[in-house]
Image (spheres, grey):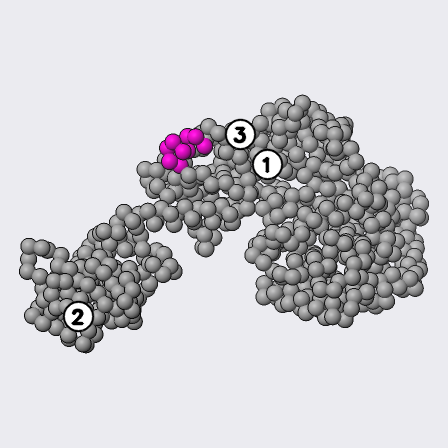
Amino acid sequence: MQENQEEIVSLEREEVKDINSASIEEKSEVVDAKSWDDAADLNMPGKSAFEDEEIDSDPQPIIKKEIKATRSAPTIPENAGSKKREPDVGVSEETSGQCEYNLRSPICCIMGHVDTGKTKLLDCIRGTNVQEGEAGGITQQIGATYFPAENICERTKELKADANLKVPGLLVIDTPGHESFTNLRSRGSGLCDIAILVVDIMHGLERHTIESLNLLKMRNTNFIIALNKVDRLYGWKVCHNASIVKAMKQQSKDVQFEFRTRLTQVITEFKEQGINTELYYKNKDMGKGTFSIVPTSAISAEGIPDLLLLLVQWTAKTMSERLTYNNIVQCTVLEVKVVEGLGTTIDVILVNGVLHEGDQIVVCGMQGPIVTSIRALLTPFPMKELRVKGSYEHHKEIKASQGIKINAQGLEHAIAGTSLYIVGPDDDVEDIKEAAMKDMRSVMSRVDKCGEGVYVQASTLGSLEALLEFLKTPEVSIPVSGIGIGNVHKKDVMKASVMLEKKKEYATILAFDVRVTQEAQELADEVGVKIYTADIIYHLFDQFKAHIDNLKEEKRKEVAEEVVFPCMLKIVPNCVFNKKDPIVLGVEVLEGIAKVGTPICIRQCLVDIGWIASIKNNGKPVDSAKKGQKVSIKIIGSNTEEQQKMFGRHFDIEDELVSKISRRSIDILKADFRVHATLQKDLSVEDWKLVLILKALFKIQ
């Protein structure tokens, strides 16, 4: 062992010399080529961007790993004898021949606001390759798009980045939106290694952008900002598939000025969110607290080469430990699908390890853990053959990172968004079953089963989690009494109908990204359960809010005859138009709201004088008058048997008039009108204070 270690150290010294000399040559070549159009402060071209750090950081881990290996196996690997290769089968970043065995492909998510061009950006990267006849090299994976390294090299040749990429490719999750990012969970951590946050240069940060940003911060996920739609700048000259530096040089001064103005605005908006950002080629602190902005156009493809190269080079450099391939299977279920000829299948993302045909697997199910064996591992054929419906390529084994369709028995109740486990020869199946159900139990534990609340249904465990988190936020604050995963069936309607007796407005199913069966809809209509469906969380909330408002309005109409709004009125001098039967007065509203139908009495002696039959403002009839308004009111006696009260005999100009409230009217105001204090038709804080004054005046308990 001692001899082996000495030999390895000597080999390492020789290798470092080779790397040093090679890096000096490469640096000089890059400087001479001026591959980034004379932009001296660019940070990323070719190998030179991270070369110095690579030399510093590589040798030590390699020696440590090799020593560890020699303890278990005292023979030196075959490739240790060649000076052209590093003496290790671990993280070797200098040779493309080895990197595909040592690093897996990074997994990338696309996030951002609606209509910022997320899907278009992905189509642009895919579509250009199709147009150029490169479709054969790009495999369309299940739920994701896989870009092999050679295609990325071809796409980025404009940047003269001749260095071999350190990763075998890039796996981009093909379901844009922050809900999908939430779904991609693997054993409690985020599945994505890096994200692209798409921002529209014309609109800056929008609502969903900030939601996505908060999610990225919460998960501590690295991201690159694609400042999209630069082609919409007025006067933009199209430079197809060009680097953004080259494209910007072709633009007029006016376009460049507008670009800088909008860029500054976006950088400022990010600062307001606590995030430092900078154009990627000026970013000296990349990965150290300052995030990179890559201007792009999904229409004419400017900046796309920059984005691709930055993604693969930055992930390979800063995440080499995370991307190191290992044999421990790490796999997440993306979707459960019924495929003609195959039955129920699951689409999965294999993050690490290898899956084999015949492997025994355990996945989380609605009725408990599902234990089954893989019948077939399938991927679609390359893009040009995707038109053949249901045509899949079979594999005996598939290595990470990939998107895969798995065919096996008993997957009908599998839950998307949970982890898939492999049962090894020495594993205890019961322990793995327990681990598989852990995610589901953690989500179920958040729901108050005995309380009042809506019933929530979602397509995957991740989207269910996202929806529950959203409903818990202070701005929304909707309680949840039950949850389900998958399509809405009759049993879900029955569970939701329990609320009809407890609290009618909560007899509602919020169904996110799922289908409602016909039987379920018919039963819901019959028993009175409302079902709201949407594929965007915010739309569900808007529908539920409208439902609550409608119920409130109906309830207001029901209690309209019983409710008394508070008001305090002052009689305007020389505006007594009729002294009796009916009394017509000009009044100023001192406090509260004077409404038609309000019973009125004299504040000083609490004598009833009748109720407001009509209100006129500038000669026009109105339903109500607010504080500060001067109007004329007609008061009719409330009791026909009693003598009608008369101005001058029972009250005069100095007396103030107030509405006669009751215990019942206070309860109605509190329950149905006070909660919506932001709306004009409801009580303000000042109005409620007047209610409390009148409550004391009338000695109401």
Please tell me the numbered disc located at residue 416.
1
Residue 102, above or below 579: above
- Residue sitting nearer the eye, 455 or 304: 304
* Tag 3 near tag 1, CB within 8 Å: no
Residue that carries the numbered disc 2 in the rendered image: 577
Q: CA distance from mark 2 to mark 1?
A: 74 Å
Specify whether residue 251 is painted magenta. no
Please tell me the numbered disc located at residue 368.
3
Amino acid marked by disc 3: Gly
N-term mark: 3 or 1:
3
N-term mark: 2 or 1:
1
At x 57% / y 34%, what residue is drawn?
Answer: 415
For the view shown, which residue lies furthest in the bottom direction?
A: 573
Q: Main secondary structure of the magenta part?
A: helix
Quadrant in which the C terminus appears: bottom left
Identify the image quadrant of residue 341: top right
At x 41% / y 46%, what residue is drawn?
Answer: 547
Amino acid marked by disc 1: Ala
Instruction: State the image coordinates of residue 492 (x, y, percent, origin top left).
Output: 45, 33
* Tag 2 near tag 1, CB within 8 Å: no
- Residue sitting nearer the eye, 529 or 473: 529
What are the residue bounds of the magenta stretch?
521-529
Instruction: State the image coordinates of residue 505 (x, y, percent, origin top left).
Output: 37, 43
Amino acid marked by disc 2: Phe
Specify whether residue 525 is painted magenta. yes
Res 228 visible: yes
